[in-house]
Amino acid sequence: MICYKYGRNCQKEGSYVNKTPIWKRNLHVSAVSVFLAGIAFSEVTPFLSLYIDSLGKFSHQQLSFWSGAIFSVVFIVAALISPMWGRLADKKGRKPMILRASLGMSIVFALMGLAQNVWQLLFLRGMQGVFAGFISNSNALIAAETPKHKSGRALGIMSSCATGGQLLGPFVGGALAQAFSYRMTFFITGFLLFTCFVLSIFFIHETDFVPVTGEKRGSFADTIKQFRSGQMIIGLLLTTLIIQAANMSINPIVSLYVRSLMGGHGKVVFISGIIAALPGIATVSAASYFGGLGDRIGTHKIILGGLLGSIILFFLTAFVQNTLELGICRFLIGFTDACLFPQVQSMLSKNSPHALTSRVFSWNQSAMYIGNIVGPMIGSTVSAHMGYSAVFLVTSGIVLLNLLLYRTNILKNIA
């Protein structure tokens, strides 16, 4: 028998509750939940543009515009609304935010399967942004509830489960859409998120929450002065923003690009799902290796190599002739991502005072949100006026700009 009360005294002899500490039970359930949520959030990516195309008769320019807008609106709304949810989480706790996000998005995703036009889908994607925050609040709860000497491993497990779900999602979504339909896949996605809600409401226990009162914090300008090199920190945040924008610029047109390479025939959605998952597979497999290599030879050198590799690979992707070549290029891009996102976080941590680590990581998250907003709009605008291949050329140029800024803001400030 599982006891659902919050207190530690509610335990049955010989039961799972009695044998397992609350923080560990929270970790087990949260790891499963964020894995399912990761699948749910990413499984619509391979066919979202094709679903948009099925909701009306659009020209090439119109389809590119709507794809970019519908991809971006989630992150625009999330960026605007998340500070409000953050303040509420400080007052009411992380579990209410987890329940709010999982239940709200389960309903929203199911309703997406009933959308009759692009305006309804745009609105519902905006509502997805309103209810965002399931994974981030789950991580925050685990960080708060887990003993400090266990928190690193616990958060590593959470990160691996979320990433694993996000990697598996495009493949699952492509397979489901191919086997059933776009609409049925949205209903299944809603069910997965409702499962996360049920797991969280019954098996997640927040025992150590202390409400945060109106704590005064300095401005960005005041805080940045406390770093050894504020210019380096700003440069790293800019690197996160630009690389995220570069990667996200591809998302609205991947399935459309695959369809054009396949001549509109064959299992387009299934192939798109595989190609969408390839970069993440490479990133997960290589991130720890590049992290250790960075500790030995310098993290800044790993980031530099990642930027150079991205420029070359994005440029080459513009000239692929078939989906096999596209898949190879996208898989290799995953290795450059492993040299960038985790290493930027590592470099931020190494160059931040301990008291400011949480704040600088929140800045980095905000930079990723902005990249999520800017990237799809760049991709959809360029593809609408210049074609799909041009998106990769422009993205290569954006990363080249990032490389130049990186040399100015970061490499010149390395001790």
Image (spheres, rainbow, N blue to C red):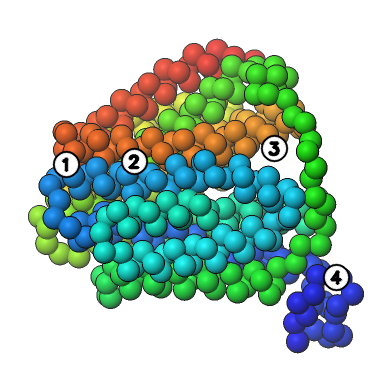
Q: Quadrant of residue 273?
A: bottom left
Q: Position of residue 339 (x, y in %)?
A: 48, 36
Dots 2, 1 in contact, CB < 8 A: no
Q: Amino acid at mark 4?
A: Gly
> Which of 351 and 81 lies nearest the eye of the viewer?
81
How far is disc 3 from disc 1 in space, using C-alphas? 42 Å
In the displayed structure, 415 sits above or below 130; it is above
Question: From mark 2 to mark 3, how far is it between C-alphas?
Answer: 28 Å
**Position of 60 compared to 21: left or right?**
left
| 2 or 4: tag closer to the N-terminus | 4
Residue 157 x %, y % = 63, 57
Q: Which residue is mark 1?
A: 61
Secondary structure at badge 4 equals loop
Quadrant, the C terminus: top right
N-term-proximal mark, 3 vs 1? 1
| Residue type (three-letter) at the residue carrying disc 3 | Ser
- Quadrant, the N terminus: bottom right
The x and y percentages for residue 330 are: 32, 46
**Mark 2 or 1, closer to the camera:** 1
Residue 376, numbered label: 2
Q: Secondary structure at mark 3?
A: helix
> Would residue 115 appear left or right of 259 to someone viewing this image?
right
For mark 1, give the secondary structure.
helix
Question: Disc 1 residue type?
Answer: Gln
Q: CA distance from mark 2 to mark 4?
A: 46 Å
Check disc 2 and give the amino acid type.
Answer: Pro
Q: Residues within 10 Å of mark 1 (few under 14, many from 20)?
A: some
Badge 3 local density, few (<14 within 10 Å), some, or many (20+)?
few
Q: Which residue is mark 3?
A: 358
Q: Quadrant of residue 169?
A: bottom left
